[in-house]
Image: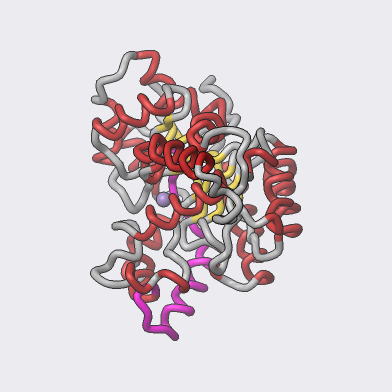
């Protein structure tokens, strides 16, 4: 059974160096967090050396990594440097895929700081470099993609029919303070809270009424949103009934919030290696919208592979989760 892992991090050396340089001049919870992850030679090698991980993939029978740039993303920087790093990362990625077409596919990075330039980079990444979609690491200096100024990016994604992987990053400065205690700003809690906020903003902001063909992927079993779908619908309908849309500055949506989630979104298992949330996501979203992921190198291949291999799924569903859904969504050629 072909195994395609769909949220696998990499980084060009220049990108890691840029964050280390930034962290060296700062002492904030985020800079301390980055130093823990990027300050270790083994972690940096896992991210930057695209030959190194192949041995681990082989050892556990992982056929392919769908690579994407690691957090916090190129939008951490100013527009010019962000775009430069994104282009460099995309070229680096395309090179690795050319060297190992059976082992790697990849998502291009873009810097939303300049939405029109980002839209052009979507086109270059997909049409010229042959990448399989785009990753954006959540907010851009505290701004979210429901803001229409970013919509040229969605136009380009829909025009090329490729998905956006909305990946976590730290909450923005405006609301990071309560997350900055007890190490909660990162993957432990802040990442999921930030990314689910972003995804719900896309839904409530009417993005999918404007772009019905837009495809969005969330990691970590949907960043808890599958659990909230009934609540989102119930509260939205309740506000509509009370005449609250206008006073609360809300959009009149064409469909219920959950309907966008179950038609425009896909989720991956990245770092969530237990059966109850998997079964729950399958129940809420159906078998065509869930894909397996490791979240290498932050999560362990040694845990993610036995989890999916032993998951209580029929052979048909197993096929979809391990590779068929990824092949169809990311247009990855079936194994020859
Ligand atoms: Mn990840």
Residue 248 position within the rendered picture, expressed as x and y whole percent measured from the top left? 55, 55
Classify 189 as above or below 129: below
In the rendered image, the residue lying farthest to the front is 242
From the image, which quarter does the N terminus lie in? top left
Residue 171 position within the rendered picture, expressed as x and y whole percent measured from the top left? 43, 64
Residue 55 shows in this picture: no
Hey, which quadrant is residue 229 in on the image?
top left
Residue in the foreground of this view, choosing between 256 and 127: 256
Residue 24 position within the rendered picture, expressed as x and y whole percent measured from the top left? 42, 82
Residue in the foreground of this view, choosing between 302 and 119: 119
Residue in view at x 39 percent, y 46 percent: 223
From the image, which quarter does the C terminus lie in? top right
Classify 304 as above or below 248: above
Q: In the image, is 162 to the left or to the right of 70?
A: right
Classify 186 as above or below 56: below
Residue in view at x 28 percent, y 26 percent: 309
Residue 286 position within the rendered picture, expressed as x and y whole percent measured from the top left? 42, 23
Residue 113 shows in this picture: yes
Give the color scheme: rainbow, by chain, secondary structure or one colour. secondary structure
> Which range is magenta?
6-30
Residue in view at x 49 percent, y 38 percent: 237
């Amino acid at each position: 059974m072909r195994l395609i892992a769909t949220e696998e991090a990499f980084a060009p050396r220049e990108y890691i160096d840029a964050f280390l340089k930034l962290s060296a001049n700062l002492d904030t919870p985020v800079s301390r967090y980055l130093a823990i992850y990027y300050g270790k030679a083994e972690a940096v090698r896992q991210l930057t050396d695209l030959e190194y991980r192949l041995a681990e993939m082989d050892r556990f029978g992982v056929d392919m990594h769908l690579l994407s740039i690691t957090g916090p993303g190129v939008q951490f920087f100013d527009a010019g440097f962000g775009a430069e790093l994104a282009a460099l990362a995309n070229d680096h990625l395309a090179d690795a895929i050319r060297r190992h077409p059976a082992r790697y596919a990849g998502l291009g990075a873009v810097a939303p700081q300049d939405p029109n330039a980002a839209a052009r980079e979507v086109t270059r990444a997909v049409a010229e470099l042959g990448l399989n979609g785009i990753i954006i690491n959540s907010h851009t200096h505290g701004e979210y993609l429901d803001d229409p100024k970013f919509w040229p990016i969605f136009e380009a994604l829909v025009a090329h029919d490729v998905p956006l992987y909305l990946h976590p990053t730290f909450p923005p400065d405006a609301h990071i303070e309560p997350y900055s205690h007890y190490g909660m700003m990162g993957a432990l809690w802040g990442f999921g809270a930030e990314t689910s906020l972003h995804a719900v903003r896309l839904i409530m902001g009417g993005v999918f009424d404007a772009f019905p063909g837009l495809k969005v992927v969330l990691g970590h079993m949907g960043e808890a949103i599958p659990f909230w779908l009934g609540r989102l619908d119930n509260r939205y309908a309740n506000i509509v009934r009370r005449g609250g849309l206008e006073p609360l500055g809300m959009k009149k949506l064409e469909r219920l919030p959950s309907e966008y989630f179950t038609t425009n979104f896909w989720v991956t298992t990245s770092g969530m290696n237990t059966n109850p949330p998997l079964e729950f996501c399958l129940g809420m979203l159906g078998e065509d919208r869930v894909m397996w992921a490791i979240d290498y190198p932050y999560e362990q291949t040694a845990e993610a592979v036995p989890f999916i291999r032993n998951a209580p799924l029929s052979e048909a569903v197993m096929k979809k989760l391990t590779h068929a859904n990824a092949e169809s969504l990311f247009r990855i050629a079936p194994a020859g």
